[in-house]
Image (cartoon, grey):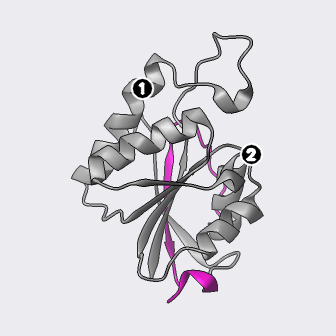
Amino acid sequence: MRILLLARHAKSDWDVADLRDHDRPLNARGRRDAPVMARRLRDEGVGLQRIVSSTATRAHATADAYAAAFGLPVLEDPALYAASAGTVLAIAAGLPDEVEVAMLVGHNPGMADAVAELTGSFVEFPTCAVAECEVDVNAWGELIEGSGRLRRLRTPSR
């Protein structure tokens, strides 16, 4: 069994009109929520071993909060930016087998769609939400549609 945490980036800042979407930073709420969610996961005993993030500024900043809480580096995968559910799950399927608990940090609708494809659970996926999915596989490469179960959806408000 493996645990895949699918995380949506925290709330981003739309105040700078001339920024490319990829370059939008977190707003004040996002900068507050991401570390709170990271500490919450750590304090609940989630044994996170790997963090892979979209290259977008807001996603990487969110991933940095988890990295700080867990003492891990952030690995970037450009394919997570605006990824479809299939791409998200393909990235998860490529994780190294020695990793049992991994987090992918990306964007909607791809993250919510990936939860649905993996677990059959359709969830509202607000900014900074984390879906904890239990995946019944011995190796990440065995991950397929329907091979997971949604254990819990965490949001900044609950």
Q: How crowded is mark 2: few (under 14 residues within 10 Å), some or many (20 or more)?
A: some
Image position of 88 with respect to 106: above or below: below
Q: Which residue is drawn at 45% across and 21% down?
A: 29
Give the camera-side residue of 157 and 70. 70
Q: In which quarter of the image is the N terminus?
A: bottom left
Q: How many marks?
A: 2
User: Disc 2 designates what residue?
Assistant: 82
Q: Which region of the structure is painted magenta? A: 121-142
Extreme residue toward the bottom, this view: 138
Image position of 73 with respect to 57: above or below: below
- Kindly tell me whether residue 9 is visible in this rendering: yes
Q: In which quarter of the image is the C terminus?
A: top left
Location of residue 11 by image quarter: top right
Q: Which amino acid does label 2 sit on?
A: Ala
Q: How crowded is mark 1: few (under 14 residues within 10 Å), some or many (20 or more)?
A: some
- Kindly tell me whether residue 157 is visible in this rendering: no
Q: Which amino acid does label 1 sit on?
A: Arg
Give the camera-side residue of 126 and 36. 36
* Residue 34 spot, x, y in % from top left: 41, 35
User: Disc 1 designates what residue?
Assistant: 31
Is 131 one of the magenta-colored residues?
A: yes
